[in-house]
Amino acid sequence: MEENSITQLTAVLIGAGARGVGAYAQFALDYPYELKFVAVAEPDQLRREKFAREYEIPADQCYESWEQLLDEDQLADIALICTMDKMHYEPTLKALNKKYHVLLEKPMSPDPRECLEMEQAARDNNRLLSICHVLRYTPFWRTIKQLLQEGRIGDIASIQLNENVGYWHIAHSFVRGNWNNSNTTSPMILSKSCHDMDVLSWLMEQPCIRVNSYGSLMHFNIANAPEGSAERCLDCKVESTCPYSAPRFYLSKQYTNWARHFTPELTKENIVRGLRETDYGRCVYRSDNNVVDHQVVGMEFASGATAMFSMCGFTFDQERRIQIMGTRGELRGDDNTITLYDFLTHQKTEITIPAQTSGHGGGDAGIVRSFLNDVRNYSSQETLTSAAASVRSHLMAFAAEVSRLEGGKSIELEAFARELLAGLQPLQAR
């Protein structure tokens, strides 16, 4: 298709943080004939002004809050909503009611009832609500899906999926960072691992019947603070012996770019100031975090197939590894290699996925491109990561967290969903 035959769509951005700007909005700069941003809502003045400059947005269409932006008449075709987890619900409902198609950062909401209400609002307004489950749009996971659909390993009997978070990543995002406390954001099974629940649901292509889960905040708490440690790494006498040292992270060439979460200018002076003044310089054993640092989830599906998911922060690499056991073969995959084993022929087939330029293995750009095509051809049907699909995997995550908090109790998904639905009022009654 020629560039000039593609209809350019317009968008507003609500939340100009790392995901909104770094992951999704970049598509408009790379493919300006497909997407143009015409307004932004962001409370941080520096971020708002920087986005406005890069995307040529006039000052009168730059807003400090999503409320101000969505109080206006509809400004664009699409609303891209990338606020923090607990701030997804209200702007999403308002945008749908204003007749925007909505691309929403995951998770939908830390409240299961809000997830169901957002799904209903999209239906009522005849608008597309897609959730940023970017893994479905990567060449790696799409290849695995295709191999399963081709029957290359027979029927799925069991899946084991490991999410290796990385010791530095869990310290950055889930101990010191924005997703460290479920009271202000979401539990780990949602904020980090709803991707994994979604992938498992997608690969299985059948309802999950029951789940159970175990996990805890085992290490990153005051009980494990080394003798002689301090509130901040820069004041700590034993910092040089700590693998989670903030100065070692953010002042190193390898991880300096992650300091953009607390300073817009990545100079040594600014980074040191951030380590003294922001949560990113706090001791990992003395932060206000409460999300788990490791968790496992067991699942049973309608066919009798099972899945085991394990999330752990205590790994060297940040990666996902999957093993799918079928009745005629086995599939194993890591970040860029898929290996098939055939039980009949003993043939071993390796598939190498080329490196991707877009984040999340190509998923960040992939979901934006797919969403734009879905909007252009919208027909009220469920799309790859529309709200209806996302609600199913979100309910698995919610049930897993209930199970974990109740000592690993088995949660029946049908009864769990029925109880949630019973508590909902019709939208017109609110």
Image (cartoon, rainbow, N blue to C red):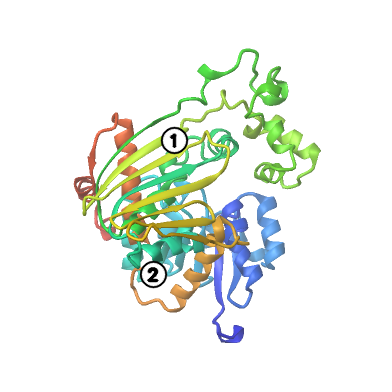
User: Going 62% across and 78% down the picture, which residue do you hit?
Assistant: 33
Q: Which residue is the site of mark 1?
A: 183
229 vs 253, left or right, is left
Q: Position of residue 405 (x, y in %)?
A: 33, 31
Q: Which residue is the site of mark 2?
A: 127
Of the image marks 2 and 1, the number of the one nearer the N terminus: 2
50 vs 208, left or right, is right
Q: Residues within 10 Å of mark 2 (few under 14, many from 20)?
A: many
Q: Position of residue 282 (x, y in %)?
A: 63, 28
Residue farthest to the front? 345
Type of the residue with mark 2: Arg
Please identify the quarter of the rendering in which residue 410 is found.
Answer: top left
Please identify the quarter of the rendering in which residue 8 is found.
Answer: bottom right
User: With respect to residue 130, does 297 lie above or below?
Assistant: above
Q: What number is the disc on residue 65? A: none
Type of the residue with mark 1: Asn
User: With respect to residue 172, does 37 lie above or below?
Assistant: below
Q: Position of residue 244 (x, y in %)?
A: 62, 29
The secondary structure type at the circle numbered 2 is loop
The secondary structure type at the circle numbered 1 is loop
Placement of the C terminus among the 4 image quadrants: bottom left
Residue farthest to the top? 227
Residue 313: tell me if it is visible: yes
Q: Position of residue 191 (x, y in %)?
A: 46, 44
User: With respect to residue 226, does 87 lie above or below?
Assistant: below
* Camera-side residue of 204 and 326: 326
User: Going 71% across and 17% down the picture, which residue do you hit?
Assistant: 237
User: Going 75% across and 42% down the picture, which residue do you hit?
Assistant: 253
Residue 385: tell me if it is visible: no
303 vs 308, left or right, is left
